[in-house]
Amino acid sequence: MIITKDQINDLNQNASAEQAEHFGFLKLALDKKGIDADEIVSKLADFQVAIPSWALGSGGTRFGRFSIGGEPTNLEQKLDDIGLLHALTQTAGAVSLHIPWDIPSDAAGIKQRADSHGIVFDAVNSNTFQDQNEQAQTYKYGSLADRQAAVREQAVAHNVEVIRYGKMLDSKSLTVWLADGASFPGQNNFRQSLQNTQKSLQEIYAELPSDWRMFIEYKPYEPSFYSTVIQDWGTSLLLAEGCGEKAFCLVDLGHHLPNTNIEQIVATLIMKGKLGGFHFNDSKYGDDDLTVGSIKPYQLFLIFNELVYGMNHNDANNPPLAWMIDASHNIKDPLEDLIQSLEAIQLAYAQALLVDTPALQAAQAESDVVLGQEILQDAYRTDVRPLIREARLKREGAIDPIAIYRKMKVRENLIKERGLKTVATGL
Ligand SMILES: [Mn+2]
Protein backbone atom coordinates (compact mmCIF):
# COMPACT_ATOMS: atom_id res chain seq x y z
CA MET A 1 0.00 0.00 0.00
CA ILE A 2 1.18 3.48 -0.84
CA ILE A 3 -0.22 6.80 0.39
CA THR A 4 0.13 9.64 -2.09
CA LYS A 5 0.51 13.34 -1.38
CA ASP A 6 -2.77 13.97 -3.20
CA GLN A 7 -4.64 11.62 -0.89
CA ILE A 8 -3.10 13.32 2.14
CA ASN A 9 -3.88 16.79 0.80
CA ASP A 10 -7.50 15.76 0.26
CA LEU A 11 -7.86 14.29 3.72
CA ASN A 12 -6.16 17.33 5.27
CA GLN A 13 -8.95 19.58 3.98
CA ASN A 14 -11.27 18.92 6.94
CA ALA A 15 -8.69 19.99 9.47
CA SER A 16 -6.90 22.77 7.63
CA ALA A 17 -9.08 25.74 8.71
CA GLU A 18 -8.79 24.78 12.36
CA GLN A 19 -5.03 24.28 12.01
CA ALA A 20 -4.62 27.70 10.41
CA GLU A 21 -6.54 29.26 13.29
CA HIS A 22 -4.54 27.46 16.00
CA PHE A 23 -1.21 28.13 14.33
CA GLY A 24 -2.05 31.81 13.82
CA PHE A 25 -2.95 32.18 17.49
CA LEU A 26 0.24 30.48 18.69
CA LYS A 27 2.37 32.42 16.23
CA LEU A 28 1.07 35.68 17.70
CA ALA A 29 1.66 34.52 21.26
CA LEU A 30 5.23 33.42 20.45
CA ASP A 31 5.86 36.60 18.54
CA LYS A 32 5.13 38.58 21.71
CA LYS A 33 7.89 36.59 23.42
CA GLY A 34 10.30 37.32 20.58
CA ILE A 35 10.12 33.78 19.18
CA ASP A 36 9.82 33.24 15.44
CA ALA A 37 7.26 30.43 14.94
CA ASP A 38 8.20 29.96 11.28
CA GLU A 39 11.82 29.34 12.20
CA ILE A 40 10.77 26.64 14.66
CA VAL A 41 8.46 25.09 12.07
CA SER A 42 11.29 24.85 9.61
CA LYS A 43 13.59 23.22 12.20
CA LEU A 44 10.85 20.70 12.97
CA ALA A 45 10.29 19.99 9.28
CA ASP A 46 13.99 19.19 8.87
CA PHE A 47 14.12 16.87 11.85
CA GLN A 48 14.17 13.20 10.81
CA VAL A 49 14.19 10.09 12.95
CA ALA A 50 15.28 6.62 11.85
CA ILE A 51 12.89 3.71 12.19
CA PRO A 52 14.54 0.41 13.08
CA SER A 53 13.85 -2.45 10.70
CA TRP A 54 12.92 -4.66 13.65
CA ALA A 55 10.12 -2.49 14.99
CA LEU A 56 7.50 -2.84 12.26
CA GLY A 57 5.96 -6.02 13.54
CA SER A 58 4.42 -6.84 16.87
CA GLY A 59 7.00 -7.15 19.58
CA GLY A 60 6.43 -9.36 22.51
CA THR A 61 7.56 -10.18 25.97
CA ARG A 62 9.08 -13.42 27.16
CA PHE A 63 5.54 -14.43 28.06
CA GLY A 64 4.12 -14.23 24.61
CA ARG A 65 3.52 -12.36 21.42
CA PHE A 66 0.25 -11.27 19.87
CA SER A 67 0.21 -10.72 16.14
CA ILE A 68 -1.41 -7.60 14.73
CA GLY A 69 -1.85 -8.97 11.21
CA GLY A 70 -0.45 -7.68 7.93
CA GLU A 71 3.06 -7.50 9.36
CA PRO A 72 5.90 -7.10 6.87
CA THR A 73 7.63 -10.41 6.16
CA ASN A 74 10.68 -9.11 4.30
CA LEU A 75 12.86 -6.05 4.11
CA GLU A 76 11.04 -4.66 1.08
CA GLN A 77 7.75 -4.67 2.96
CA LYS A 78 9.41 -3.12 6.00
CA LEU A 79 10.63 -0.26 3.84
CA ASP A 80 7.11 0.09 2.46
CA ASP A 81 5.80 0.41 6.03
CA ILE A 82 8.35 3.10 6.81
CA GLY A 83 7.29 4.72 3.55
CA LEU A 84 3.71 4.89 4.90
CA LEU A 85 4.96 6.39 8.16
CA HIS A 86 7.06 8.92 6.31
CA ALA A 87 4.25 9.88 3.94
CA LEU A 88 1.99 10.64 6.91
CA THR A 89 4.45 12.17 9.38
CA GLN A 90 7.26 13.45 7.12
CA THR A 91 9.53 12.67 10.08
CA ALA A 92 10.55 9.07 9.37
CA GLY A 93 13.00 9.64 6.53
CA ALA A 94 15.53 7.00 7.59
CA VAL A 95 15.79 3.32 8.41
CA SER A 96 18.23 1.58 10.72
CA LEU A 97 18.96 -1.97 9.59
CA HIS A 98 19.60 -4.90 11.82
CA ILE A 99 21.89 -7.65 10.61
CA PRO A 100 21.17 -10.57 10.34
CA TRP A 101 17.42 -10.05 10.78
CA ASP A 102 17.34 -7.90 7.67
CA ILE A 103 20.15 -8.75 5.31
CA PRO A 104 19.97 -6.64 2.12
CA SER A 105 20.66 -9.49 -0.30
CA ASP A 106 19.74 -7.29 -3.26
CA ALA A 107 21.39 -4.05 -2.14
CA ALA A 108 20.67 -2.11 -5.34
CA GLY A 109 16.99 -3.10 -5.28
CA ILE A 110 16.69 -2.28 -1.57
CA LYS A 111 18.30 1.11 -2.07
CA GLN A 112 15.97 1.89 -4.94
CA ARG A 113 12.96 0.86 -2.87
CA ALA A 114 14.05 3.08 0.03
CA ASP A 115 14.74 5.90 -2.37
CA SER A 116 11.23 5.70 -3.82
CA HIS A 117 9.91 6.35 -0.29
CA GLY A 118 12.40 9.16 0.41
CA ILE A 119 14.20 7.01 3.00
CA VAL A 120 17.96 6.95 3.64
CA PHE A 121 19.98 4.35 5.55
CA ASP A 122 20.99 5.37 9.04
CA ALA A 123 23.20 3.28 11.36
CA VAL A 124 23.50 -0.44 10.76
CA ASN A 125 23.20 -2.65 13.83
CA SER A 126 25.14 -5.81 14.55
CA ASN A 127 23.86 -8.73 16.58
CA THR A 128 26.12 -10.87 18.69
CA PHE A 129 23.46 -11.57 21.30
CA GLN A 130 21.90 -14.49 19.44
CA ASP A 131 23.40 -17.55 17.80
CA GLN A 132 22.73 -17.93 14.09
CA ASN A 133 22.31 -21.35 12.48
CA GLU A 134 25.53 -21.52 10.57
CA GLN A 135 27.93 -20.03 13.09
CA ALA A 136 30.79 -22.07 14.60
CA GLN A 137 31.00 -20.48 18.08
CA THR A 138 28.24 -19.78 20.58
CA TYR A 139 27.58 -16.40 22.20
CA LYS A 140 26.02 -18.03 25.22
CA TYR A 141 28.76 -16.73 27.54
CA GLY A 142 29.80 -13.66 25.61
CA SER A 143 30.82 -12.24 22.25
CA LEU A 144 33.27 -9.32 21.99
CA ALA A 145 34.12 -9.82 25.67
CA ASP A 146 34.27 -13.59 25.67
CA ARG A 147 37.20 -15.37 27.29
CA GLN A 148 37.79 -17.47 24.17
CA ALA A 149 39.65 -15.81 21.30
CA ALA A 150 37.69 -17.81 18.69
CA VAL A 151 34.39 -16.39 19.93
CA ARG A 152 35.72 -12.84 19.94
CA GLU A 153 37.13 -13.26 16.43
CA GLN A 154 33.77 -14.48 15.16
CA ALA A 155 31.99 -11.52 16.80
CA VAL A 156 34.48 -9.03 15.34
CA ALA A 157 34.14 -10.63 11.88
CA HIS A 158 30.35 -10.29 12.12
CA ASN A 159 30.64 -6.56 12.84
CA VAL A 160 33.02 -6.15 9.90
CA GLU A 161 30.45 -7.92 7.71
CA VAL A 162 27.76 -5.53 8.96
CA ILE A 163 29.96 -2.59 7.91
CA ARG A 164 30.24 -4.21 4.47
CA TYR A 165 26.43 -4.35 4.14
CA GLY A 166 26.16 -0.79 5.37
CA LYS A 167 28.63 0.44 2.75
CA MET A 168 26.47 -1.05 0.01
CA LEU A 169 23.54 1.04 1.25
CA ASP A 170 25.42 4.29 1.94
CA SER A 171 25.01 3.92 5.66
CA LYS A 172 27.61 5.89 7.59
CA SER A 173 27.58 4.37 11.04
CA LEU A 174 27.66 1.14 13.00
CA THR A 175 25.87 0.62 16.29
CA VAL A 176 27.31 -1.98 18.64
CA TRP A 177 25.29 -3.19 21.56
CA LEU A 178 26.60 -6.00 23.69
CA ALA A 179 24.59 -8.43 25.75
CA ASP A 180 27.90 -9.56 27.26
CA GLY A 181 28.07 -9.76 31.02
CA ALA A 182 27.48 -12.14 33.86
CA SER A 183 24.29 -13.44 35.37
CA PHE A 184 26.02 -14.53 38.58
CA PRO A 185 28.88 -13.31 40.78
CA GLY A 186 32.02 -15.28 40.07
CA GLN A 187 31.04 -15.97 36.47
CA ASN A 188 33.45 -13.47 34.87
CA ASN A 189 36.55 -11.51 35.65
CA PHE A 190 35.41 -7.88 35.27
CA ARG A 191 38.75 -6.51 34.17
CA GLN A 192 39.38 -9.24 31.63
CA SER A 193 35.90 -8.82 30.11
CA LEU A 194 36.38 -5.09 29.73
CA GLN A 195 39.88 -5.46 28.28
CA ASN A 196 38.63 -8.05 25.78
CA THR A 197 35.78 -5.72 24.79
CA GLN A 198 38.12 -2.79 24.26
CA LYS A 199 40.45 -4.88 22.10
CA SER A 200 37.56 -6.30 20.03
CA LEU A 201 36.08 -2.83 19.52
CA GLN A 202 39.48 -1.53 18.42
CA GLU A 203 39.63 -4.33 15.83
CA ILE A 204 36.20 -3.37 14.49
CA TYR A 205 37.14 0.31 14.59
CA ALA A 206 40.19 -0.42 12.45
CA GLU A 207 37.83 -1.62 9.70
CA LEU A 208 35.59 1.45 9.89
CA PRO A 209 35.63 3.57 6.70
CA SER A 210 37.07 7.04 7.24
CA ASP A 211 33.68 8.80 6.93
CA TRP A 212 31.92 6.39 9.29
CA ARG A 213 31.20 6.57 13.00
CA MET A 214 30.87 3.78 15.55
CA PHE A 215 28.28 4.04 18.31
CA ILE A 216 28.76 2.13 21.55
CA GLU A 217 25.52 1.47 23.42
CA TYR A 218 25.40 0.74 27.15
CA LYS A 219 22.89 -0.99 29.38
CA PRO A 220 23.03 -1.75 33.13
CA TYR A 221 21.38 -5.16 33.08
CA GLU A 222 19.51 -7.66 30.92
CA PRO A 223 19.98 -10.20 29.46
CA SER A 224 22.82 -10.54 31.96
CA PHE A 225 21.34 -9.97 35.38
CA TYR A 226 24.37 -9.55 37.63
CA SER A 227 26.64 -7.35 35.54
CA THR A 228 26.90 -6.00 32.02
CA VAL A 229 30.31 -5.30 30.51
CA ILE A 230 29.25 -1.90 29.10
CA GLN A 231 27.01 -1.02 32.02
CA ASP A 232 26.84 2.77 31.80
CA TRP A 233 27.77 5.93 29.88
CA GLY A 234 31.12 6.16 31.65
CA THR A 235 32.17 2.72 30.45
CA SER A 236 30.88 3.52 26.97
CA LEU A 237 32.88 6.78 26.95
CA LEU A 238 35.99 5.00 28.18
CA LEU A 239 35.72 2.45 25.37
CA ALA A 240 34.94 5.10 22.74
CA GLU A 241 37.98 7.12 23.80
CA GLY A 242 40.03 3.94 23.68
CA CYS A 243 39.01 3.47 20.04
CA GLY A 244 39.42 6.96 18.60
CA GLU A 245 37.69 10.05 17.29
CA LYS A 246 35.15 8.16 15.16
CA ALA A 247 33.78 6.28 18.19
CA PHE A 248 30.89 7.74 20.19
CA CYS A 249 28.48 6.87 22.99
CA LEU A 250 24.90 5.96 22.24
CA VAL A 251 22.18 6.75 24.76
CA ASP A 252 19.12 4.50 24.81
CA LEU A 253 16.52 6.03 27.12
CA GLY A 254 15.47 2.62 28.44
CA HIS A 255 19.03 1.59 29.29
CA HIS A 256 19.23 3.27 32.68
CA LEU A 257 18.32 2.33 36.19
CA PRO A 258 15.13 4.00 37.47
CA ASN A 259 15.40 7.75 38.13
CA THR A 260 18.79 8.15 36.45
CA ASN A 261 19.29 11.76 35.38
CA ILE A 262 19.59 11.14 31.64
CA GLU A 263 19.57 14.84 30.72
CA GLN A 264 22.71 15.31 32.77
CA ILE A 265 24.39 12.43 30.93
CA VAL A 266 23.45 14.07 27.63
CA ALA A 267 24.94 17.40 28.75
CA THR A 268 28.20 15.73 29.81
CA LEU A 269 28.61 13.69 26.62
CA ILE A 270 27.99 16.68 24.34
CA MET A 271 30.47 18.69 26.40
CA LYS A 272 33.03 15.99 25.57
CA GLY A 273 31.92 15.86 21.91
CA LYS A 274 31.18 12.17 22.35
CA LEU A 275 27.42 11.83 21.99
CA GLY A 276 26.78 9.84 18.82
CA GLY A 277 23.17 8.87 18.82
CA PHE A 278 19.94 8.39 20.60
CA HIS A 279 17.51 5.51 20.94
CA PHE A 280 14.07 6.79 21.92
CA ASN A 281 11.52 4.84 23.92
CA ASP A 282 9.91 5.18 27.33
CA SER A 283 9.74 3.11 30.45
CA LYS A 284 8.17 2.86 33.84
CA TYR A 285 10.46 0.26 35.40
CA GLY A 286 13.21 -1.06 33.14
CA ASP A 287 13.92 -1.44 29.44
CA ASP A 288 10.19 -1.51 28.75
CA ASP A 289 10.52 -0.15 25.20
CA LEU A 290 7.20 1.68 25.45
CA THR A 291 5.94 4.45 23.19
CA VAL A 292 8.13 7.57 23.43
CA GLY A 293 6.61 10.15 25.77
CA SER A 294 3.93 7.80 27.06
CA ILE A 295 5.23 7.71 30.65
CA LYS A 296 7.67 10.56 31.28
CA PRO A 297 7.14 13.37 28.77
CA TYR A 298 8.71 15.99 31.07
CA GLN A 299 11.93 13.99 31.22
CA LEU A 300 11.92 13.81 27.44
CA PHE A 301 11.57 17.59 27.27
CA LEU A 302 14.44 18.09 29.74
CA ILE A 303 16.62 15.80 27.62
CA PHE A 304 15.77 17.76 24.47
CA ASN A 305 16.50 20.96 26.35
CA GLU A 306 20.06 19.71 26.92
CA LEU A 307 20.34 18.50 23.33
CA VAL A 308 19.29 21.88 21.96
CA TYR A 309 21.56 23.73 24.39
CA GLY A 310 24.43 21.38 23.55
CA MET A 311 24.00 21.84 19.82
CA ASN A 312 23.80 25.64 20.19
CA HIS A 313 26.90 25.69 22.39
CA ASN A 314 28.88 23.01 20.65
CA ASP A 315 32.40 23.83 21.84
CA ALA A 316 33.65 20.27 21.45
CA ASN A 317 32.29 19.94 17.89
CA ASN A 318 29.94 17.09 18.67
CA PRO A 319 28.76 15.85 15.24
CA PRO A 320 25.05 15.80 14.34
CA LEU A 321 23.28 13.04 16.23
CA ALA A 322 21.76 9.86 14.85
CA TRP A 323 18.16 9.75 16.07
CA MET A 324 16.36 6.45 16.21
CA ILE A 325 13.28 4.96 17.80
CA ASP A 326 14.04 1.73 19.62
CA ALA A 327 10.71 0.57 20.95
CA SER A 328 8.69 -2.59 20.92
CA HIS A 329 4.99 -2.77 20.26
CA ASN A 330 3.30 -5.40 22.35
CA ILE A 331 -0.35 -4.52 22.14
CA LYS A 332 -0.66 -1.55 19.77
CA ASP A 333 -0.57 -1.48 15.99
CA PRO A 334 3.20 -0.92 15.44
CA LEU A 335 2.60 1.81 12.85
CA GLU A 336 0.20 3.75 15.08
CA ASP A 337 2.64 3.31 17.96
CA LEU A 338 5.50 4.68 15.85
CA ILE A 339 3.38 7.65 14.76
CA GLN A 340 2.77 8.42 18.43
CA SER A 341 6.49 8.13 19.19
CA LEU A 342 7.45 10.41 16.31
CA GLU A 343 4.88 12.95 17.51
CA ALA A 344 6.24 12.82 21.07
CA ILE A 345 9.80 13.37 19.87
CA GLN A 346 8.75 16.36 17.77
CA LEU A 347 6.75 17.81 20.67
CA ALA A 348 9.69 17.60 23.06
CA TYR A 349 12.00 19.12 20.45
CA ALA A 350 9.57 21.97 19.77
CA GLN A 351 9.16 22.69 23.49
CA ALA A 352 12.92 22.73 23.94
CA LEU A 353 13.25 25.22 21.09
CA LEU A 354 10.96 27.57 23.05
CA VAL A 355 13.20 27.74 26.11
CA ASP A 356 14.46 31.26 26.72
CA THR A 357 18.09 30.31 27.26
CA PRO A 358 19.48 33.82 28.01
CA ALA A 359 16.74 34.33 30.63
CA LEU A 360 17.50 30.90 32.10
CA GLN A 361 21.20 31.69 32.30
CA ALA A 362 20.43 35.02 33.99
CA ALA A 363 18.20 33.26 36.52
CA GLN A 364 20.97 30.73 37.19
CA ALA A 365 23.52 33.52 37.63
CA GLU A 366 21.24 35.10 40.23
CA SER A 367 20.51 31.73 41.86
CA ASP A 368 16.85 32.44 41.19
CA VAL A 369 15.67 28.85 41.51
CA VAL A 370 12.00 29.70 41.16
CA LEU A 371 12.51 31.65 37.95
CA GLY A 372 14.66 28.89 36.45
CA GLN A 373 11.85 26.40 36.94
CA GLU A 374 9.26 28.90 35.64
CA ILE A 375 11.24 29.40 32.44
CA LEU A 376 11.54 25.68 31.73
CA GLN A 377 7.93 24.94 32.58
CA ASP A 378 6.65 27.86 30.55
CA ALA A 379 8.14 26.19 27.48
CA TYR A 380 7.01 22.72 28.51
CA ARG A 381 3.43 23.81 29.15
CA THR A 382 3.04 25.56 25.83
CA ASP A 383 0.74 23.58 23.54
CA VAL A 384 3.12 23.20 20.59
CA ARG A 385 0.94 20.85 18.57
CA PRO A 386 0.06 23.54 16.01
CA LEU A 387 3.81 23.91 15.28
CA ILE A 388 4.24 20.18 14.66
CA ARG A 389 1.19 20.08 12.43
CA GLU A 390 2.41 23.11 10.50
CA ALA A 391 5.79 21.40 9.98
CA ARG A 392 4.05 18.34 8.56
CA LEU A 393 1.84 20.49 6.35
CA LYS A 394 4.87 22.28 5.01
CA ARG A 395 6.17 18.95 3.70
CA GLU A 396 2.72 17.79 2.57
CA GLY A 397 2.33 15.34 5.42
CA ALA A 398 -0.82 14.72 7.44
CA ILE A 399 -2.17 17.30 9.87
CA ASP A 400 -3.40 14.39 11.96
CA PRO A 401 -1.48 11.24 10.94
CA ILE A 402 -3.38 8.75 13.13
CA ALA A 403 -6.76 10.04 11.92
CA ILE A 404 -5.72 9.67 8.28
CA TYR A 405 -4.11 6.29 8.96
CA ARG A 406 -7.44 5.09 10.31
CA LYS A 407 -9.54 6.80 7.70
CA MET A 408 -7.51 5.11 4.96
CA LYS A 409 -7.82 1.78 6.77
CA VAL A 410 -4.10 1.15 6.40
CA ARG A 411 -3.90 -1.87 8.70
CA GLU A 412 -6.95 -3.47 7.09
CA ASN A 413 -5.32 -2.97 3.70
CA LEU A 414 -2.04 -4.46 4.85
CA ILE A 415 -3.86 -7.49 6.21
CA LYS A 416 -5.61 -7.86 2.86
CA GLU A 417 -2.29 -7.61 1.00
CA ARG A 418 -0.14 -9.73 3.28
CA GLY A 419 -2.48 -11.90 5.28
CA LEU A 420 -3.54 -12.01 8.90
CA LYS A 421 -0.93 -14.45 10.16
CA THR A 422 2.39 -12.91 9.18
CA VAL A 423 5.40 -12.54 11.41
CA ALA A 424 8.07 -9.87 11.01
CA THR A 425 11.68 -10.71 11.82
CA GLY A 426 12.93 -8.77 14.79
CA LEU A 427 12.05 -8.39 18.42
MN1 LIG B 1 18.76 0.52 21.80
Image: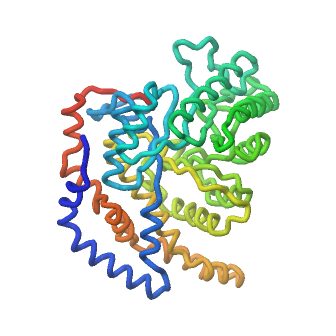
Quadrant of the rendered image containing residue 123: top right
Q: Residue at x 39, y 48 (%)?
A: 118
Q: Quadrant of the C terminus?
A: top left
Horizontal side of residue 266 vs 196, given as left or right: left
- 256 w.r.t. 24: above or below: above
Q: Position of residue 87 (x, y in %)?
A: 32, 51
Q: Residue at x 59, y 53 (%)?
A: 321
Q: Position of residue 197 (x, y in %)?
A: 74, 31
Q: Can residue 62 be seen by looking at this rendering?
A: no
Q: Residue at x 37, y 53 (%)?
A: 340
Q: Position of residue 355 (x, y in %)?
A: 54, 75
Horizontal side of residue 27 vs 185, given as left or right: left
Q: Nearer the viewer, residue 111 or 274?
A: 111
Looking at the rendered structure, the number of numbered marks drawn on it comes to: 0
Q: Position of residue 202 (x, y in %)?
A: 75, 34
* Image quadrant, ligand 1: top right
- 408 w.r.t. 107: above or below: below
Q: Can residue 157 be seen by looking at this rendering?
A: yes
Q: Residue at x 54, y 12 (%)?
A: 134
- 131 w.r.t. 39: above or below: above
Q: Quadrant of the N terminus?
A: top left
